[in-house]
Amino acid sequence: MSQAYNHEQIAAIIATQQDRPGALLPILHDIQDALGYIPPDSVAQIASALNLSRAEVHGVITFYHHFRTTPPAKHTIQICCAEACQSMGAEHLVAHAEQKIAVRKQGDCTVQPVYCLGLCATSPAMMVDDQLHARVTTEKFDRLIKKIGGGS
Amino acid sequence: MSIKIFVPGDSAALALGADAVTRAILAEAARRNIAVNLVRNGSRGMLWLEPLVEVQTAKGRVAYGPVSADDVAGLFDAKFDQGDKHALGLGLTEEIPYLKRQERLTFARVGITDPVSLEDYLAHDGYQGLHKALTMPAAAIVQQVTESGLRGRGGAAFPTGIKWQTVLNTAAAQKYIVCNADEGDSGTFADRMLMEGDPFVLIEGMTIAALAVGATQGYIYVRSEYPYAITVLNEAIEIARKAGYLGANILQSGKGFQLEVRKGAGSYVCGEETALLESLEGKRGIVRAKPPLPAISGLFGKPTVINNVISLASMPIILDKGAAFYKDYGMGCSRGTLPFQLAGNIRHGGLIEKAFGVTLRELLYEFGGGSASGRPIKAVQVGGPLGSYLPESQWDTPLDYEAYTNLWAVLGHGGIVVHDDRADLAKLARYAMKFCAIESCGKCTPCRIGATRGVEVMDKIIANQDRPAQVELLRDLCDTMLNGSMCAMGGMTPYPVLSALNHFAKDFGVVK
Ligand SMILES: Cc1cc2nc3c(=O)[nH]c(=O)nc-3n(C[C@H](O)[C@H](O)[C@H](O)COP(=O)(O)O)c2cc1C
Ligand code: SF4
Ligand code: FES
């Protein structure tokens, strides 16, 4: 299984970060950046390295919206649902995106809400994986989705 | 001789295809045997024109925008590289009224310089403030900040000089400077534009803060939604360190300051200063009870200056030009400038740095050009998700902290979100409650439970179930949240909710 491999990789990440003050968040970020998520079975390992209880580490992971404990879909589509984007039709865009993703059937995309990407003067805004997009019309959305493979 | 062309590397420009434009320019120039020196500058803040391409000419920089990769060949055909006319041509950048009518103090260099060129920074008055600060006793630096009248730009508008004085007066072996770059408010992007467009000014401002209070370690807490700002800051910090502007012995002064970037993790409440400190310590972002003030017992229990990006980035010009220069801008007890951010349903959205005292109507129409949809503007939310919705009758009030307090509104971090006449203020009020429910840190009941109840009540109002009684319940609930919450998350969610109800009662089905 890949578990043993993860264990070592996580140990290496912990080792590079653990002497920094307030090391837990940087460690969690590094793990998620490397693996795409934070494996639940790594909690005990992180806790013991930082001299924390497992409950404390678990509490931190669940507090922050950014951290995931399950592997993400191949593509993550984050659509801004905050006020400025709402004023430019974000709600319509989300409905359109969900419908497009549903008919796409590859099951390789998830659509998530995000609350402000700092692109509020060029709304609606979204992020596909790590790429930002602004002034997203439904047509622009369809073009972008085609580009990330498959497409309907 | 090569021509100098500028294509912004700002996130908003990138989100609109600036990288593709850059590639097209380089390819087209190569094809035509034209030597190009291409600079990735910050954004000028005229975001409806992004990607805004500029060319250096003998007369000054000439702008074209919004440019897409497909336009590039045509631009070369029209000799844009010599500043010639083209359908996308905007003339000399500095003469564009939107820019010309601003008072750019904190954003003086943003969009002009190469953000990660220290030479460029120095050539544009960079590090003048620090040089002055290095010759001054700590108390004199704090004195300048106090006299400038600067109030925190993160939202609460607390006088920065008083905060610094408290940290200076508190003896401790270790003190910290923390920059709040969590910028979670919808409609705001000034911190992002500044960090991406002129990172050195923030680094310089934090270094001045360190000298002023005797701190040796600094952290910039940047939200995870701003990956590009994080990259630019890290690059600039490394450059500053190598050049001796950061480190154990800044410019051979015998004083040291180390600086590090920390990444947030998608929590709005972590913008609240004590929750941010908890997060920096590696914990859940739960708001702390005050007292103690962070200035006395902050990060890791040590005296800590925590300020917003714009507050800290305003220090270099205050120290360089003097408190009186800065204080000369503004009105009443609102001194200096605020970078207003015009967002949402607006034709000419962007960043407008102006002295306090300008009105919303001027920003909406003289700068913004009205709504993007061409429909009438109905409501404007000023100051982020915890700010009030303003109806047209309030748009002539000067943007000033006290004047807004009198309207039961706030300036916050300067975000202005425009909604046209299709907006349903009851839905927006429901959203405000829902956002509070999602982001509540959970420490106190009025916020944790109140916001969830608020969503339920709004659902009933929207569904026309027992409206008069539900509206009364909503007012009651807001009263409890206003008076019983520990921080402004729960304590100010009633601002958007009640302002919507009071000014747009029709949307709630309550005839007025
Ligand atoms: C829920 C909540 C979110 C906040 N978010 C931010 C933020 O993103 N950035 C910020 O600078 N201040 C934010 N603040 C204000 C900070 O608590 C604090 O007043 C500020 O960092 C102080 O810096 P300043 O005096 O320079 O404004 C927030 C406050 C609350 C209650
Ligand atoms: S008002 Fe809300 S966010 Fe603030 S301390 Fe209370 S529960 Fe936490
Ligand atoms: S509100 Fe959508 S990017 Fe800011």
Image: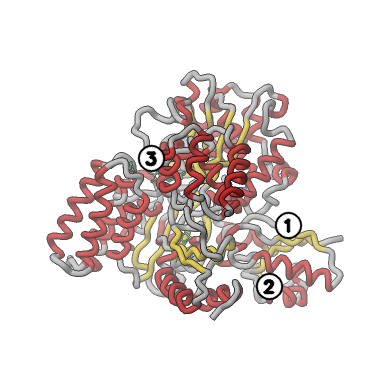
Q: Nearer the viewer, residue B247 or B132?
A: B247
**Amino acid at pointer 1:** Val
| Dot in front, 1 or 3 | 3
Q: Chain of mark 1?
A: B
Mark 2 vs mark 3, CA separation in Å: 46 Å
First in sequence: mark 2 vs mark 1: 1
Residue topped by disc 2: B69
Judge: label 3 CB < 8 Å from ligand 2: yes
**Amino acid at pointer 2:** Ala
Q: Are marks 2 and 3 on the same chain?
A: yes
Q: Is residue A77 above or below residue B416?
A: below
* Residue B426: quarter of image: bottom left
Q: How is the image coloured?
A: secondary structure
**Amino acid at pointer 3:** Ile
The picture places residue A16, in percent across and down from the top left corner, at 63, 38
Q: Residue at x 18, y 66 (%)?
A: B510
Residue topped by disc 3: B286
First in sequence: mark 1 vs mark 3: 1
Residue topped by disc 1: B39
Secondary structure beneath dot 1 equals strand
Secondary structure beneath dot 2 equals helix
Image quadrant holding the C terminus of chain B, namely: bottom left
Q: Residue at x 13, y 65 (%)?
A: B466
Mark 1 vs mark 3, CA separation in Å: 42 Å
The picture places residue B50, in percent across and down from the top left corner, at 60, 65
